[in-house]
Image: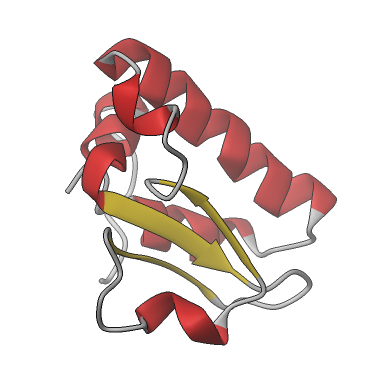
Amino acid sequence: MDVTNGILCWTPNTADVAVVPWPDEAGFSEGFGMTALGCWNYARHLEFEERKALVFVEAMHLIVRDKMPADAVHAALWVLDEYRDGCAEDMPIPNV
């Protein structure tokens, strides 16, 4: 999955974070307080490297601004090609 077909969903101040398919015809994103990435029209038109930067900026927003556990954010984002491509080769693979 990548940013063009995945929505990052989360509820601030919890560990409740996931990436769900875009478009979200099944309503998986409805139980979350916030959404980002694939649901943004402009994000789906960015080049891969630009999307990769966007994913890492959003990760920092969740961890720092929204007080989300870093391990939960890491586990949720692991499904995105842009996130995995930006991680070091020795990055622990989350139990997803």
Q: From what the image shows, is residue 95 above or below residue 63?
A: below
Q: Which residue does the image show at 21% across and 37% down from the upper left?
A: 81
Q: Which residue does the image show at 47% across and 20% down from the upper left?
A: 53
Q: From what the image shows, is residue 50 above or below residue 10?
A: above
Q: Position of residue 46 (x, y in %)?
A: 35, 18
Q: From what the image shows, is residue 3 above or below residue 45?
A: below
Q: Position of residue 78 (x, y in %)?
A: 31, 51
Q: Position of residue 3 (x, y in %)?
A: 31, 40
Q: Is residue 5 left or right of residue 32?
A: left
Q: Which residue does the image show at 50% across and 82% down from the upper left?
A: 30
Where is the C terminus found, in terms of image quarters?
bottom left
Q: Is residue 31 left or right of residue 14?
A: left
- Depth check, front residue: 31 or 60: 31
- Depth check, front residue: 10 or 5: 5
Q: From what the image shows, is residue 88 above or below residue 83?
A: above
- Depth check, front residue: 3 or 16: 3
How is colour applied across the structure in the image?
secondary structure
Q: Splitting the image into 4 quarters, where does residue 52 fall?
A: top left
Q: Splitting the image into 4 quarters, where does residue 28 fall?
A: bottom left
Q: How many marks on residues?
A: 0
Q: Which residue does the image show at 42% across and 36% down from the upper left?
A: 41
Residue at the left extreme?
Answer: 1
Q: Is residue 64 left or right of residue 42?
A: right
Q: Position of residue 6 (x, y in %)?
A: 30, 53
